[in-house]
Image (cartoon, helix red, strand yellow):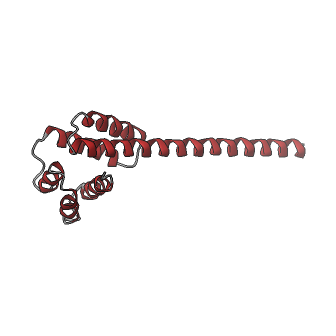
C-alpha cells in the first residue's frame, strides 16, 4: 500500500515538474517573440521618422503584435499609440508636444533631453522616455 502511494506521489511530482517546464519554455518563447516585435517596431518607426512613410504600417503591425503578447507591460501599446500620433501629425498633449516635435524633426538627442526633463509625475513619462531612448539607440 505504501509503495502504491509512493508511486502516485512520485508520478504527480513528475507531471507537475513537466507542466512547470513546459510553461517556462512557453513563457521564454513568448518573451523572445515580444522582444523581436518591439525591435522591429522601433526600427520601422525610426525609418518612418527618417522619411520612409511606408514604414509606419510596419511599425504599427509590429507594436500591435507586441501589445497582443504582453499582459503587464504597457510599453508596446504606448508605442503603438505614439506611432499613430506621430503618423497623423495631430497635436500632442501640451506637456509632450515639444518631444514629439523634436522626434518629427529627427532631433533625437533634443527629444531625449526634453523627455528626461518632463515632470516625473506625468503619466506615461517613463514610457515616452523609453521610446525616445530606444529610437535614439536605433540611429543608423
- At x 38%, y 40%, the residue is 66
Q: Where residue 69 sits: x, y (%)?
A: 42, 39
Q: Position of residue 28 (x, y in %)?
A: 54, 46
For this orientation, the residue located farthest to the front is: 140
Q: Residue at x 68, y 42 (%)?
A: 18
Number of labels in the image equals 0
Looking at the rendered image, the quarter that the N terminus falls into is top right
Occupied quadrant, residue 86:
top left
Name the residue rendered at 33%, 40% in the picture. Answer: 63
65 to 129, vertically: above or below: above
Q: Quadrant of residue 107?
A: bottom left
Q: Is residue 20 left or right of residue 45?
A: right
Residue 62 point in image, percent of width and height: 35, 38
| Relative horizontal placement of residue 85, taking residue 139 as reference (left or right) | left
Percent position of residue 44, x then y: 30, 41
* Most foreground residue, 22 or 40: 40
In this rendered view, identify the residue nearer to me: 83 or 137: 137
Amino acid at each position: 500500500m505504501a509503495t502504491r502511494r509512493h508511486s502516485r506521489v512520485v508520478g504527480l511530482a513528475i507531471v507537475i515538474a513537466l507542466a512547470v517546464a513546459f510553461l517556462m519554455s512557453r513563457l521564454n518563447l513568448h518573451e523572445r517573440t515580444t522582444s523581436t516585435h518591439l525591435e522591429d517596431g522601433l526600427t520601422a518607426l525610426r525609418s518612418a521618422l527618417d522619411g520612409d512613410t511606408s514604414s509606419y504600417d510596419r511599425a504599427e503591425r509590429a507594436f500591435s503584435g507586441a501589445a497582443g503578447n504582453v499582459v503587464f507591460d504597457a510599453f508596446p501599446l504606448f508605442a503603438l499609440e505614439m506611432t499613430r500620433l506621430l503618423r497623423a501629425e495631430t497635436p500632442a498633449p501640451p506637456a509632450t508636444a515639444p518631444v514629439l516635435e523634436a522626434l518629427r524633426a529627427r532631433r533625437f538627442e533634443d527629444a531625449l533631453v526634453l523627455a528626461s526633463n518632463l515632470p516625473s509625475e506625468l503619466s506615461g513619462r517613463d514610457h515616452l522616455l523609453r521610446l525616445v531612448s530606444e529610437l535614439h539607440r536605433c540611429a543608423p
